Amino acid sequence: MKLEPAQLAALNAPLLTQHQHRLHVLQGETDRVESIIQQLIDFQIAIPSWALGTGGTRFGRFSGGGEPRSLDEKIEDVGLLHALNRSGGAISLHIPWDIPDDPARIRALAEGLGIRFDAVNSNTFQDQPGQALSYKFGSLQHVDPAVRRQAVAHNIEVIRHGAALGSDSITVWLADGSCFPGQLNFRQAFQRTLDSLHEIYAALPANWKMYVEYKAYEPNFYSMTVGDWGQSLLYAQKLGPQAFALVDLGHHLPNANIEQIVALLLMEGKLGGFHFNDSKYGDDDLTVGSINPYQLFLIFKELVEGMDARKLPHASGLAWMIDASHNVKDPLEDLLQSVEAIKIAYAQALLVDQTALAEAQEQNDTVRAQEILQAAFRTDVRPLLAEARLRAGGALDPLAAFRHLQVRAGLIRERGVGTAATGL
Ligand SMILES: [Mn+2]
C-alpha cells in the first residue's frame, strides 16, 4: 500500500485556511518561526522495526490485523508513516528478526520511500531456534567463554548485515545480570562484558558507532550488568571514541532526573542516542509524551542547549529512535502520536529563551527561570509542525489522514487479519 501526494493534498485543502490562521498567530509572537520550521523539516526519527506490530506483555498479546509479515512490509509501513508526517525517514532493524535476504534489493526498496537505515540491534536476550548455547545466564558476561564467543560472533554478524544496508551504528542492549544475591561476581561480570564488547568494538568499521544501552532492571531483577548511565559511561569510556551511551527513557528507576543524565553525558561527549517512549512505572514502552510531556520537554531543552554548546547539528548529531510497544493501540497510529510528541517537545525547546534563562540562573532568580521554561512549554507549537509537514509534502493532520484513508483496513485487505509481526 502506498499513499499518493494527490491523496494528501486533497485532505489538506479544506484545512489550509484554519492552519494559516494559527500559523499567523505564532508568527506574531516570535520571530523564529521560519528557522524552527526548517529545523523541524530536517529532524527525522527512526522507527523501530519491532514496533510496527502489536506488542505484548508476559500475560498475553492481542494482535491486530494487517501486521507486517516480512522486512519488506515493515519498510512499507515506515514508508506509510513517512509519507504522512515526513518525519520518519529511518528504520532501526533488529537481528535476527530482520535479516535481509538481499541487502541491495532491501536498500533500494527503502531508498525509494526516502528511508535510510539507522542503528542495527543485536539480540542475545533470548535463544533462537537451533542455537548451540543458551543465554539463560547471560551472553557477553557468561562464565563460559564459548557462550561469550557465540554472543560476540552474533554482534559482529549484526554489524555485517547493517553495513550491507548502509547503517553506521549498532545498539547493544544486554539482558545480562543476575536475579539473586550471590549469583554473580559483579566485578568479573563487568570485566567479561567489557572484554566481549572490546572484541565487537574491534570489528566496527571506521565510520561506525557503538551504542551501549543501559536498563535498571528486567529481565534480571537483582543486578543488571549495564544497569545505569554510570555503567554505560564506564564501558563507553573504556572502549574508545566510537562507543557511546544510549538513553532509553524507560530504563531508569522511578523519578530519575533523566534530563540531568542527558546533560552530563552530552557534556562528556558520550551521549550517542535515544530510545524514546514514556512510562508510568518502569519500562512501560508507552506512547512518547503520553504520560509526562513536561519531562520530555525538559530533556529536549538540555539536548538543544548541550548540542549547541558542542556545535552538534540537531538532526544528525545524535541517533533519534523510538523504542515502544503497543498493546492496545494501532501501532501505526501510536507511532504517529509518538513522532508528533517528540517534535512538539523539540520545537518547544527551540523556543526557550536561552539568553534570558542564563541571566536568571546567574541572578539565582528561580521564579523567572521557571517562567522562561514554562512559557516555551505552554506554547502551542503544533502549527509549526503542521507547516513543516506541509512544506515537506506530508499531511497537515497525519492521524486524521491515516483514518480517513483507511490505511489499516487496506493493510488488512493486503495481508490478512491473522498476521503477526516478528518481535516481542
Ligand atoms: Mn531501548
Image (spheres, rainbow, N blue to C red):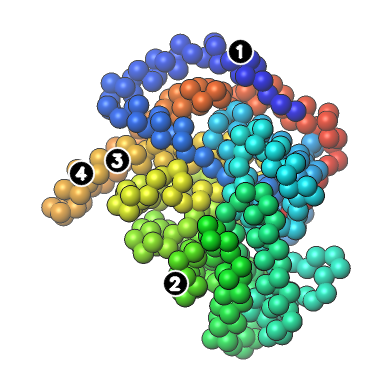
Q: Determine the image quadrant of residue 105.
A: top right
Provide the residue designation for mark 2: 237
Give the residue displayed 15% in from the left and 54% down from the top: 362
Badge 4 marks a residue whose secondary structure is helix
Circle 3 crowding by C-alpha within 10 Å: few under 14, some 14–19, many from 20 = some
Question: Is any part of residue 355 visible from this angle?
Answer: yes
What type is the residue that disc 4 sits on?
A: Thr
Rendering coords of residue 66 (x, y %): 79, 36
Label 3 and label 1: CA atoms lie apart by 35 Å
Q: Do tag 2 and tag 4 residues touch (Cβ < 8 Å)?
A: no
Circle 2 crowding by C-alpha within 10 Å: few under 14, some 14–19, many from 20 = some
Give the residue displayed 49% in from the left and 64% down from the top: 242
In front: 307, or 198? 198
What label sits on residue 355 in the rendered view? 4
Q: Earlier in the sequence, mark 2 or mark 4?
A: 2
For this orientation, the residue located farthest to the left is: 363
Q: Is residue 254 left or right of residue 224?
A: left
Q: Earlier in the sequence, mark 3 or mark 2?
A: 2
Q: Quadrant of the N terminus?
A: top right
Provide the residue designation for mark 3: 352
Of discs 2 and 1, which sits in the foreground? 2
Provide the residue designation for mark 1: 10
Rendering coords of residue 318 (x, y %): 46, 51
